[in-house]
Image (cartoon, grey):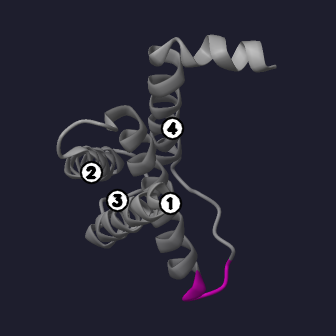
């Protein structure tokens, strides 16, 4: 197991970029679904949806930080790249039947990214 981990760490394309690209593909897949299941809890559906957006794009921001770590202004670049993908995600949903572009989702994406980056820095300081 340790040898496999060392092998993987020596290959930054796999170690850094594969999780990022896989997560971006997962987001694209979810955005392509015409109707995602809702728990049917009234206004709580919006809370769950907003939390899911914040979580998914928070993870994306962390994955961007992994790729950009050590570079100047990495956090700002990770935030900008995450928001660019969030914007493209909302644009993509505009063309999916049963879905629509929602500025509130974009705001939740940004909030999730900012909170995740703050947690990243707090964790790295420890």
The answer to whether 17 is drawn above or below residue 92 in the figure is above
How many marks can you see?
Answer: 4
Q: Earlier in the sequence, mark 3 or mark 1?
A: 3
Residue at (52% x, 71% y) in the render:
51
> Helix, strand or loop at disc 4?
helix
Q: Earlier in the sequence, mark 4 or mark 3?
A: 4
The x and y percentages for residue 120 are 44, 57
Q: Is 43 part of what is drawn in magenta?
A: yes
Left or right of 88, for residue 111: right
Instruction: Tell us which disc is closer to us: 2 or 1.
Output: 1
| Residue occupied by mark 3 | 100
The reply to whether callout 3 and callout 2 are in contact (CB within 8 Å) is: no
- In three-dimensional space, the C-alpha distance between marks 3 and 2, rounded to whole angstroms, equals 29 Å
Mark drawn on residue 109: none
The answer to whether 94 is drawn above or below residue 25 in the figure is below
The reply to whether callout 4 and callout 3 are in contact (CB within 8 Å) is: no
Instruction: Tell us which disc is closer to us: 3 or 1.
Output: 1
Instruction: Tell us which disc is closer to us: 3 or 2.
Output: 2
Residue at (64% x, 10% y) in the render:
7
Q: Residues within 10 Å of mark 4 (few under 14, many from 20)?
A: some
Left or right of 56, for residue 109: left
- In three-dimensional space, the C-alpha distance between marks 4 and 3, rounded to whole angstroms, equals 21 Å
The answer to whether 113 is drawn above or below residue 5 in the figure is below
> Helix, strand or loop at disc 3?
loop
Q: Earlier in the sequence, mark 2 or mark 1?
A: 2
Residue at (37% x, 40% y) in the render:
64
For the residue pair 46 and 116, the one nearer the viewer reads as: 116
Mark drawn on residue 23: 4
The x and y percentages for residue 121 are 40, 59
| Residue occupied by mark 1 | 123
**Residue at the bottom extreme of this rendering:** 43
Residue 17 appears in which quarter of the rendering? Answer: top left
């Amino acid at each position: 197991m340790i040898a496999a981990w060392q092998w993987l760490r020596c290959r930054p394309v796999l170690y850094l970029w594969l999780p990022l690209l896989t997560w971006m593909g997962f987001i694209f897949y979810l955005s392509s679904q015409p109707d995602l299941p809702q728990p049917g809890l009234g206004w709580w559906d919006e809370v769950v949806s907003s939390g899911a957006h914040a979580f998914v794009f928070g993870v994306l921001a962390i994955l961007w930080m992994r790729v950009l770590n050590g570079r100047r202004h990495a956090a700002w670049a990770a935030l900008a790249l995450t928001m660019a993908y969030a914007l493209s995600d909302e644009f993509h949903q505009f063309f999916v039947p049963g879905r629509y572009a929602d500025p509130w989702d974009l705001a939740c994406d940004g909030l999730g990214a900012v909170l995740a980056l703050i947690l990243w820095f707090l964790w790295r300081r420890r």
